[in-house]
């Protein structure tokens, strides 16, 4: 391809950039061994850089040519969007799990669907199954039958178990969003607290 004539920039583009195929010049095990959940973790960080943050970072380079600076900003934004689109659709992109308690109400497990927020797919609802977890054996005992909820806010069931697990799948037009996300809660404290997350790759 022909690169724009910006000597300050060099060969840098976004049109042919493929996030999953990209590799550093020197072999790096972080890329060679990368799983979908690893890539999702990194893409979450990349997604937090909004356009203004990207422009601010590039401005510290003190380019002499304003057009070159604008080209770098636009290219980085395009690459960010490609990274997000690639890795938020390879795995169920649920994140930011936390327990919220409204006055006079039981606790709820609340989360964000980063893929839906990024406009990458539609959501019909969230299928959730609750389990009690035996922390010694790791065994899960089903506490509730699967149910479908429209919002990313799940009521925490009553249980005397020390640990609970919520298995969540997103009903969506994006096939990978059907993959399970298991969220583990410590249940013998108030409020309950999120202590672990496991994702189906």
Image (cartoon, rainbow, N blue to C red):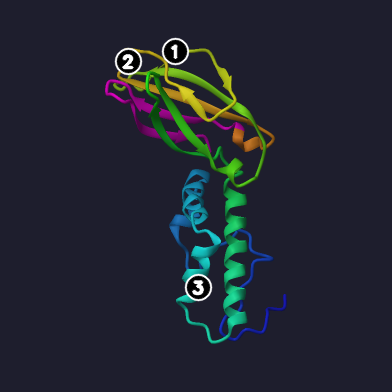
Q: Gap in Å between the C-alphas at discs 2 and 3?
A: 51 Å
Report which quarter residue 78 is drawn in: bottom right
Q: Which residue has dot 2 on it?
A: 161
Q: Residue at x 57, y 61 (%)?
A: 22
Q: Is residue 65 left or right of residue 46?
A: right
200 part of magenta stretch: yes
Report helix, strand or loop for mark 2. loop
Residue lying furthest left = 189
Report helix, strand or loop for mark 1. loop
Residue 119 horizontal/vertical position (percent): 64, 45
Q: Which residue has dot 3 on it?
A: 58
Do the CB atoms of the residues marked 2 and 1 lie less than 8 Å apart?
A: yes
Q: Residue at x 57, y 66 (%)?
A: 76
Residue lying furthest right = 1
**Of pointers 3 and 1, the one earlier in the residue sequence:** 3
Magenta segment: 178-201
**Of pointers 2 and 1, the one earlier in the residue sequence:** 1
Report which quarter residue 115 is drawn in: top right
Q: Which residue has dot 1 on it?
A: 143
Q: In which quarter of the image is the N terminus?
A: bottom right
For the image shown, how many numbered marks are present on the structure? 3
Q: Which of 158 and 18 is in front in this view?
A: 158
């Amino acid at each position: 391809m022909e690169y724009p004539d910006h000597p300050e920039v060099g060969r840098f583009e976004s049109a042919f950039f493929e996030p999953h195929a990209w590799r550093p010049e020197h072999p790096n095990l972080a890329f060679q061994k990368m799983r979908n959940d690893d890539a999702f973790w990194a893409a979450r960080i990349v997604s937090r850089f909004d356009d203004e943050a990207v422009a601010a970072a590039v401005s510290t380079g003190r380019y002499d040519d304003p057009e070159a600076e604008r080209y770098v900003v636009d290219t980085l934004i395009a690459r960010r969007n490609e990274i997000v689109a690639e890795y938020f659709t390879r795995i169920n992109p649920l994140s930011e799990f936390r327990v919220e308690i409204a006055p006079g109400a039981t606790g709820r497990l609340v989360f964000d669907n980063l893929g839906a927020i990024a406009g990458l797919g539609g959501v019909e609802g969230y299928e959730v199954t609750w389990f009690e977890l035996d922390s010694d054996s790791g065994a899960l005992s089903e506490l509730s039958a699967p149910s479908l909820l429209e919002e990313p806010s799940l009521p925490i069931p009553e249980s005397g178990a020390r640990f609970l697990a919520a298995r969540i799948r997103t009903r969506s037009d994006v096939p990978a969003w059907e993959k399970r996300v298991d969220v583990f809660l410590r249940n013998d404290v108030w409020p309950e607290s999120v202590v672990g997350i496991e994702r189906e790759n």
